């Protein structure tokens, strides 16, 4: 076969605007929707799926955008399943079907019921037998159900067929990482085209490499590399929520740190209140961020609210303010809009 002749002596001439425009028109005609010119690139029409926490939503900028793959990870008891269910509820409120892959086989009816805004008719729990079956089912969902939301709980419990068939004493290193890499490559295209959203849940485990430092997550680097947003959850030992009268523990503060973010500035962190058996305390979460950024004045345990009902400013205890946020929908929406107005310029 003859080699292609290279004209080494041809003088370099930069492409003219006419050549660039002509090639752009030709590629648009030849490749269709696979090519988008710069002025036509718009992501504003994509839905975002709330995490259930006002604090976390706004440090993420645009949380869990359609067409993206994301990850939340942390140690045991940090609230990963709770946040996944809050994301599921937000998705069902938008009319999106949610397919919850429960590889850990721990998701119970009681956990689902703790998030009352989750629409059960749009929620499916799926329990694959092994990792390969899970990969095929996830691919079927993102290809056949445009706009769906996939919750994958969790990467740690993926069981490759080769491990299922082998003796428990035989070492099978790297099988989960290979399977995760294969799954990501198969779903990244259809996820973006069909405007789905995939949320992986990972556990932090001890790193067995004697030359490595710190903890790690199973599944290799495929998911962290492709994820648009990654959030690490950490339970605060000094952040337990206790009843002032009885001293009983009823919740915890979970620190959420954004480790990767394609929508806004990364490495920000907030503390989110999680109530056992009820999920994220959205009223307390909103009150805390309003207090932190100065929308509601706070001093010595009292909150000052100035509005149409209280033009001169009246002080309230925390319980009274929380009751108003929960029961007064227009007031709650006004607080959320105020948070958006203050934080949107900073995120831009």
Image (spheres, rainbow, N blue to C red):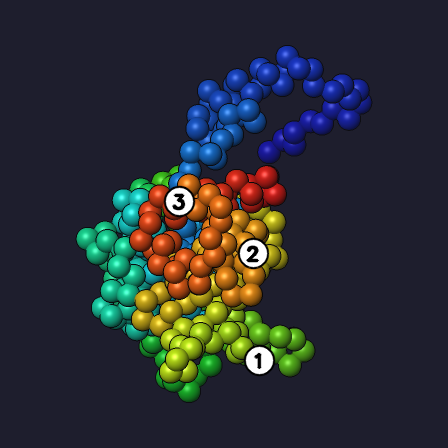
- Can I make out residue 177 in this image? no
The location of residue 169, given as percent across then percent down, is 42, 87
Q: CA distance from mark 1 to mark 3?
A: 60 Å
- Earlier-in-chain disc, 2 versus 1: 1
Q: Is residue 322 left or right of residue 73?
A: left
Tell me the residue that label 2 is attached to: 292
Quadrant of the image occupied by residue 104: bottom left
Picture residue at 49% right of the left edge, 49% below the top:
313
Location of the N terminus by quadrant is top right
- Determine contact: label 2, label 1, CB under 8 Å: no
Distance from the alpha carbon under mark 2 to that under mark 1: 41 Å
Q: At numbered mark 2, what does the secondary structure look like: helix, strand or loop?
A: helix
Q: Please tell me which residue lies in front, 235 or 161.
A: 235
Using the numbered discs, state the Cα–Cα distance from disc 2 to disc 3 in whole angstroms: 23 Å
Of badges 2 and 3, nearer the viewer stands 3
User: Which x, y percent locates residue 278?
Assistant: 32, 67
* Residue beneath disc 3: 309
Residue at mark 1: 208
Mark 2, mark 1: which one is toward the viewer? 2
Q: Please rate how many residues cluster around mark 1, counting C-alpha atoms within 10 Å: few if below 14, some from 14 to 19, many from 20.
A: few
């Amino acid at each position: 076969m003859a080699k292609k002749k290279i004209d080494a002596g041809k003088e370099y001439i930069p492409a003219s605007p006419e050549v660039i425009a002509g090639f752009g028109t030709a590629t648009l005609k030849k490749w269709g929707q696979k090519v988008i010119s710069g002025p036509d690139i718009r992501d504003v029409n994509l839905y975002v799926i709330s995490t259930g926490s006002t604090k976390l939503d706004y440090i993420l900028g645009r949380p869990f955008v359609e067409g993206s793959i994301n990850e939340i990870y942390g140690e045991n008891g940090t609230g990963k399943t709770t946040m996944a269910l809050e994301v599921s509820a937000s998705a069902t409120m938008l009319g999106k079907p949610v397919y919850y892959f429960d590889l850990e086989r721990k998701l119970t009816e009681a956990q689902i019921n703790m998030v009352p805004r989750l629409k059960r008719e749009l929620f499916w729990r799926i329990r694959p037998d092994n990792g390969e079956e899970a990969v095929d089912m996830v691919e079927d969902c993102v290809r056949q159900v445009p706009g769906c939301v996939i919750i994958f709980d969790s990467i740690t419990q993926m069981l490759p067929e080769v491990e299922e068939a082998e003796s428990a004493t035989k070492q099978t290193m790297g099988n989960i990482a290979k399977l995760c890499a294969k799954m990501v490559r198969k779903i990244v295209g259809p996820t973006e085209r069909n405007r789905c959203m995939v949320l992986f849940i990972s556990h932090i485990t001890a790193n067995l490499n004697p030359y490595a430092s710190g903890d790690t997550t199973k599944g290799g680097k495929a998911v962290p590399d492709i994820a648009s947003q990654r959030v690490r959850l950490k339970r605060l030992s000094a952040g337990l929520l206790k009843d002032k009268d009885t001293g009983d523990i009823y919740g915890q503060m979970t620190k959420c740190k954004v480790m990767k973010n394609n929508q806004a500035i990364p490495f920000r962190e907030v503390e989110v209140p999680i109530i056992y058996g009820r999920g994220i305390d959205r009223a307390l979460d909103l009150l805390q961020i309003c207090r932190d950024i100065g929308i509601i004045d706070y001093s010595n345990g009292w909150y000052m609210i100035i509005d149409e009902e209280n033009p001169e400013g009246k002080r309230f205890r925390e319980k009274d303010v929380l009751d108003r946020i929960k029961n007064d929908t227009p007031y709650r929406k006004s607080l959320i809009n105020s948070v958006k107005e203050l934080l949107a310029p900073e995120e831009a």
